[in-house]
Amino acid sequence: MGEKVAAGAVDLSGRQQYREKLRQCLAGLGRLLAEERFDRPKNLMGLEIELNLAGPDGLPRMMNGQVLERIASRDFQTELAMFNLEVNIAPHRLGGRVLDRLAEELRTGLSYAHRKANEVDAGIVMIGILPTLTQDDLVSANLSEVDRYTLLNDQIVAARGEDFLLDIEGVERLTCTSQSIVPEAACTSVQLHLQVTPERFADVWNAAQAVAAVQIALGANSPFLFGRELWRESRPPLFQQSTDTRPPELVAQGVRPRTWFGERWIGSAYDLFEENLRFFPPLLPLCDEEDPARVLDDGGVPSLAELVLHNGTVYRWNRPVYGIADGVPHLRVENRVLPAGPTVIDVVANTAFYYGVVRALAEDTVPVWSLLPFEAAAANFDTACRHGIDAELEWPRPGRYGGTAKIPAVTLVLEELLPLAAAGLDAWGVEPADRDLYLGVIEERCRRRVNGASWQAATFHRACESGLDRHAALAATTRRYCELMHAGEAVHTWPVGLPQPALPLA
């Protein structure tokens, strides 16, 4: 939730007023769509990465304020907890050598931030969940000192009415409770934005939903939480449970969680914003003075502030975004599926695969979502989170006319989706050298069945076998991860295990 809001008591009597204002905003969005007021295609992409701060010991450092003060760049911002940062990359036009330029910008920015963090005995770690986090780290006292986070936490806690239950069963089982939403801060992700026209929005969103499970299978990087080995990508269940406003009775009634995959393919961006109003009570009923209808009548462009703020408190893995640039409204699909890391080249490879495959699937004459039940796409997402690179996913049979079948994710990528991603990047006008380099990283991950999660788990177990206890093994795995992350080679090349200690001199 990136909106700037002031902390303070929310006037409960204003909730009806806010709900009415949301309806006015939705009507305003409907008018903008009907009047075709949205920006023309610009082939623009954007990227945000959430980061962790850790010390040389591999343990989290609660000092984002001090680090940001030293970085002194508007590209870097706070995130939910004091061990989090976020870096925002300016929008790029898809085409040419955009992937190499993106990689260079990320390397430069992250290297600079890491040097500045080193000045206060901290460092930048790009990883889905920092393995050394403990329950004691994820408490209200470690919320970032920003009003919007405090207010959001207070409202979700009030809506919940009781402690949050975290219960995730994977390789091991984690069961614990929290009195705040701060455990959500453990989830650090890559967010990919794609500006699209209203006419193309539904196809792009549906395509992104269809391949979300594949993104997770390829990019899983979050196997540990609170000392337990859970799912290969533990962010989604953690995020859902740590922001869940539903007590058990509402869960039993089928009330939707605020963090969710969705329940249907869509025909318009309007569908998603309308669902937000229909299914989710407002958490932050803060009213703007704007009258959307009057602004539209006067030929202006409404900010739809309430609609935007409310949308920011519904945590879809592919989220619709309404924005205004240079006085012209636009729509974006925000892909929130991927964990951060492991390296810049891995992040850019994941980015290349996403933009390529989504373009190809969105333009397919027989759309994958016309053949894949939405329930299967949602089940695929859950399966990929649990099993990562080893997941088997349900997918339409070749030829698109023979029903669906279970297929290993790596086989699906190698035999069908990588060629589509290459064709999609060609359609964007991306240089073949960039296309081949970054999709080659995805190909090697599949051939070797290695991603960040599999490397972390294998290295942790190797460390335990060497005699380290669980906590020491997690810390050693984190330190080794940081070394290799900053060295910059793609994760499929990383040697498993800890480096051997030097032999003592005779």
Image (cartoon, grey):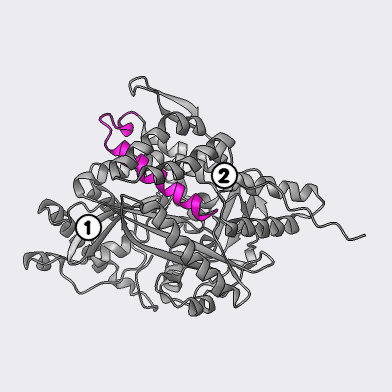
Residue 367 covered by magenta stretch = yes
Q: CA distance from mark 2 to mark 1?
A: 35 Å
Quadrant location of the C terminus in the rendered image? bottom right
Q: Is residue 243 toward the left or the right of residue 135 in the image?
A: left
Label 1 sits on residue? 330
Residue 482, horizontal then vertical, whole percent: 62, 59
Q: Residue at x 36, y 78 (%)?
A: 6
Label 1 sits on what residue type?
Answer: His
**Residue 47 vertical placement versus 11 (above, below):** above
Number of marks drawn: 2
Q: Nearer the viewer, mark 2 or mark 1?
A: 2
In this rendering, does residue 340 appear at all? no
Q: Residue at x 40, y 23 (%)?
A: 397
In this view, the residue farthest toward the right is 506
Mark 2, other Cα within 10 Å: few <14 / some 14–19 / many ≥20: many
Secondary structure state at the residue bearing disc 1: strand
In this view, the residue farthest toward the left is 298
**Residue 359 vertical placement versus 176 (above, below):** above
Q: Are marks 2 and 1 in contact (CB under 8 Å)?
A: no
Residue 325, horizontal then vertical, whole percent: 22, 65
Q: Is residue 326 toward the left or the right of residue 184 in the image?
A: left
Secondary structure state at the residue bearing disc 2: loop
Residue 294, horizontal then vertical, whole percent: 10, 68
Label 2 sits on what residue type?
Answer: Asn
In this rendering, does residue 182 appear at all? yes
**Residue 406 vertical placement versus 348 (above, below):** above
Magenta residues span: 342-371
Which is more toward the observer, 35 or 362? 362
Label 2 sits on residue? 451
Residue 147, horizontal then vertical, whole percent: 42, 76
